[in-house]
Amino acid sequence: MFKGESSYIAGAKGNFGKMIKNLRRNYPLLFFLLPAVVVVILFCYLPIYGILIAFQDFMPGDKILSDTTIWVGFDNFSRFFNDFQFWPLMKNTFLLCIIGFVIGFPLPIIMSLLLNALKSKRMAKFLQTVYNAPHFISLVVMVGMLYLFFGRYGLVNNIAEKLGFDRYSYFLEKGAFRPMYILSSNWQDFGWSAIIYIAALSNVEPEHHEAAVIDGASRFQRLIHIDFPAITPIVSVMLIMSIGGLMGVGYEKVLLMQTAGNLSTSEIIATYVYKKGLTGVPDQGYATAIGLFNSIINVILLIIANTVSKKFSENSLW
Amino acid sequence: MEQSIINTNKKKNRMKESRSDRVFYIVDMIFLFIMAAIVIYPLYFIIIASISNADAVLGGRVFLYPVDITFVGYAKIMERADVWTGYLNTIIYTLLTTVFALVITVLAGWALSRKKLPFRKFFMVFFIITMFFGGGLIPFYNVVSSLGLLNSIWAIILPSVLSVWNLFMTKTFFEGMSESMIEAAEIDGAGHTATFFYIILPLSKAIMAVMALYYAVGQWNSYFNAMIFLKDEAKYPLQLVLREILIASETTTGGSGETILEQYRLANQLKYVSVIISSLPVIMLYPFVQKHFAQGVMIGALK
Amino acid sequence: MKKLSSIILSAIMLLSFAACGGNNADERTSNAVDSLVEKYGYQWTDTTKPILNAEGAKDISFNIYSSKNASALDYNDMKVMQDLYESTNVRVTWENVSESVYTTQKNLIFGNAADRPDAIYHAGMSAGEIIKYAKRKVLLPISDYLDYMPNFKKILEDRPDIKKQLLNVEDNKIYSLPRIEEMGLLQYPNLLFINKSWVNKVIEAGAVTGITSADVKDGLELTAAQMENILKYFRDNDMNGNGKTNDERPMNFVYNNWQGNQCDLYGMFGLNDNLEHRVIVDGRVTYSVVDDRFKEATNFISKWVTDGLIDKVSFEQSQDNFLANGKGLEIYGAFYWWESETVVSHPENYVVCKPLLGPNGDQTICVSNNPEIGTGEVIIFRDCPNPEVLLTYFDRYYMPEISAQINYGPIGIVYEEEKDENGMLVQKPIPEGVTADELRLQNAPLGIIYLNDYAWKNVLNMEPRAKLRLDRLDLYASPFVANSVKPVPNLQFTLEELNVLSNYETGINDYITTNLIEWLLKGGVKDSAWGDFKTRINQIGLPQVQKVFQDAYDRYASENK
């Protein structure tokens, strides 16, 4: 017992000593970090006390900690969990996010590899510029175009009818919402998200390729064995961070695309909370509580993703 | 010297190009062209919709070429002085944000990428937390307000100078750099600062170009902070000005009959016009930024 | 390490709490008014005289935050506002933001407790917000100051129904100033229009019986069966003569839009449906969606949908798309809308129909709950100094002649200085290059007004379009609604009741919406599904919501008589 204790102390001392030594040698690195830390403290940590609103009956102008604060414990959470829509909302949100992720995550990676493999670099550059352009389209225009193209009398249906098919109401069928939402989002952003991978690919040393060519590797083999490994670190980190941000789907686009017909698939947590805010009692506490709930799910996902990644590859976020 | 290596490579490649390689290149090309077509058509549509009669657009009668060409939308936007000040403001905000953000992100990304950084784990958690937990709008507003930034352009710039997401991407990029090279520099007696500025920075053009692009476009497209923090309309960025014009043309409060019709027509045309007005400059600038990361920057330095 | 970080965190948190501003609203002392009278000549009894003297105009001013229509001039530069200052000596500094910015900033204005304006104009406060802020003593109880508001006081005395819509149930006080524009246009939001020459073609072809081409004029009355035949003919034939038989849209509307929606169709089965499916019948709050006639009607309408008589696009299109497709080549057979003039290029080709006569002989229409009284239009913060003066100033807005100018634009720009022989305001000729609406939006702030029957008869004329629609409603809408049926007015709830609504309403709405559209588009509702629906909707809180509305309505109706 005594022994254990003393060795514990010694260990701590040892660690402490190491720390001091490390600090003495590497303190300049802390200055590198300083501006970022200041910004984060100012704009993220100073306002973070707002999380407490999740446990309050809060109206703008209320003080967050004072004797007039109305604490409601976990009421805001239990109101959400007990809502009869809770499970459908969770399901819709999860499905939208997960399918979106499964398609949206690999697509830019594949595109960057294929672009990189193009023989004509000028062509690659040109295509890349084209792929980036949709990123700049505003949501309103994006959804407006979806309606014009996929509406009952839109382009797609007009072509389908010419080919002898019946008109299909993409906006009224609950089955069409998710594909339309996800594909249009990917359409808008695959090029933009590919940029980081393309930059990472530019660091592949040509010698590797030359050596492989001499060994008789085909271009496709080189793509798999040289190009892809070169970007795995950034891919892993992006993967972990994306999984950690999985539930973070906003309400704007979904709301714009929502019709009575697709409501049963398009009602997600974010839109539901938004609507609740418009009717009945304004309730900052409720919205904050749901935001916090989302964050907690995200954190759990992040930790799982990081742990798994650490286990199966040497890449991890921390 | 370098040139000649590349040339001989090319020859070698051509000689060795197998049938499977040829198939690969062709399939690759076709696939990328199909994707390009899928991307280009809607872009083309936005252009023709912005100069077509709004009734024809909304009625689905515009798809291959503009109908009843009109430049009313462009005229309406160009004639407004606030659009031009908006442009100027946006350029200023974007430049300032990008410069600050680059410095902060690259410095911090480098520090975080070093295993030797004291309290490294703590700082990682410190940054990760902010990706998930925020205090919400009202506390954020009150903080910015108590910093005295209300109605100041710094309220637009300062909160945008660090994205933790971008920070982690930068960190990962640095982690991928050859460790031996850095150690060599340190053995040569270079301190942290010297290593960073003389060895690392020159090799980081690619990541800096990408970050500059992400930060710049993020700021270019944003309007929310401007909307809540700026009172003075002369400081509005372009996106907010365009948004206001759009909303102005959509509101029908008190209007009736012909006005409603005229307004929704204009509103619908302005939607498309504003996309073009606001994004064209950035899209055109893209190739210049692209230069910096589309070529292998590492190679030369390593030799 | 964890400890260290938590210490830092809590230190930061403490700091930030300390940074939060204070908020006290002091009760006013009783002799404040006396000193106002003494020093600044404050008077509120003569509504034609200035409220303050020149001294007051110099010393007292109010800072009012207001959203404005984007086409409107800055309120400080508006002639109406300047004229009001001339006539009252009450100086107001307006802080204008656009409507979209206001929506985002609203919470921040309330949140920034240390630095709020004196009042918010166009505040757009919901009943829930008012009740919660009132409880927190953020808002000024306007009803305590009625003595200084002769016009508003009189409105409340004359119109207990308006008063009841404003009174906070929790403490029986009024916290907001209303906008009251009673034209009688909103209660019936739909009219049925049909293409005259197309119907005549159907009659010529003998595809419909019981009507002759002499009947095809405004006020055309059709049975459901006749309508069905007509729509079938529209569907199958090249009505507009462009060589295609498939581009005609027989019947068409904008589903669940606030006007021009599907609700009138339910009138064929005797239901006065609306978007909330909630209406007062004989003093009872009733829900059309649990009425068995609703099932019958839904099945009937659904058949029109699956047969292609009602174009499916009606369920997905926005108002803009609906309006755009009405232009150019005629493709609309029959449609529901506010008026025909905005929808089609040639409104003269269309006639207004009476409500459709249902298979069981029922003939009625939608009764909507769109209120003509907007509560929560102006609120005053408790910290406002000299609220009596501000309220006397706002009270002037309720005088008919000022209301008219607030709503339509000032004398001198929109109206002539001289009135006509009946004392009515006369429209000035519209200057070159602007439309009447542009002129109005530019020069009228809109907002708190009182325009009722008296005003329409004695002060100003209704716009011609409004008049036209009113005449149509008198002929083809109002006569078909039973006296026992009333829309649900603005009701005041207790906080507890509001919580009930907040817990259930969004869920119930979603449940109804998803089922109803499924039935309408996919061939109707089976008896078993209908039974399940009724059971389920009771489980998820419809009775609770209904009870809340009934209680609130009973309170409204009881003292109203």
Image (cartoon, coloured by chain):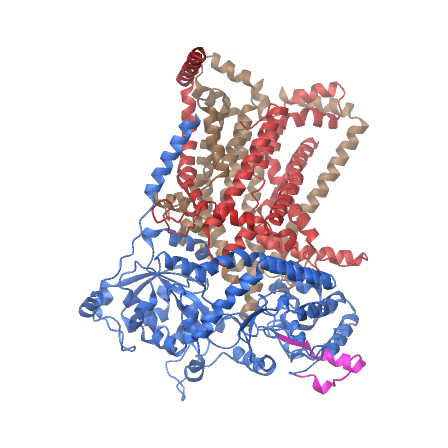
Chain colours: A red, B brown, C blue
Q: Which image quadrant for residue C198?
A: bottom right
C262 in relation to B231, above or below: below
Q: Is residue C215 magenta?
A: yes
Query: Outermost residue, front direction?
Result: A1
C425 vs B65, nearest the viewer = C425
Left or right of A17 in this view: A157: right
Q: Is residue C463 visible?
A: yes
Tell me which segment is drawn in magenta.
C191-217
Please state the horizontal and vertical placement of residue A248, each as a whole percent of the image.
56, 43
For the point 61% across and 47% down, the residue is A87
Q: Which image quadrant for residue C233?
A: bottom right
- If the image is split into quadrants, where does the C terminus of chain B sit? top right
C54 vs A90, nearest the viewer = A90
B101 in relation to C260, above or below: above
Q: Which image quadrant for residue C366?
A: bottom right
Please state the horizontal and vertical placement of residue A140, each as a whole percent of the image.
58, 54
Q: Is residue C112 magenta?
A: no
Please state the horizontal and vertical placement of residue B232, each as a whole percent of the image.
38, 53
Q: How many marks?
A: 0
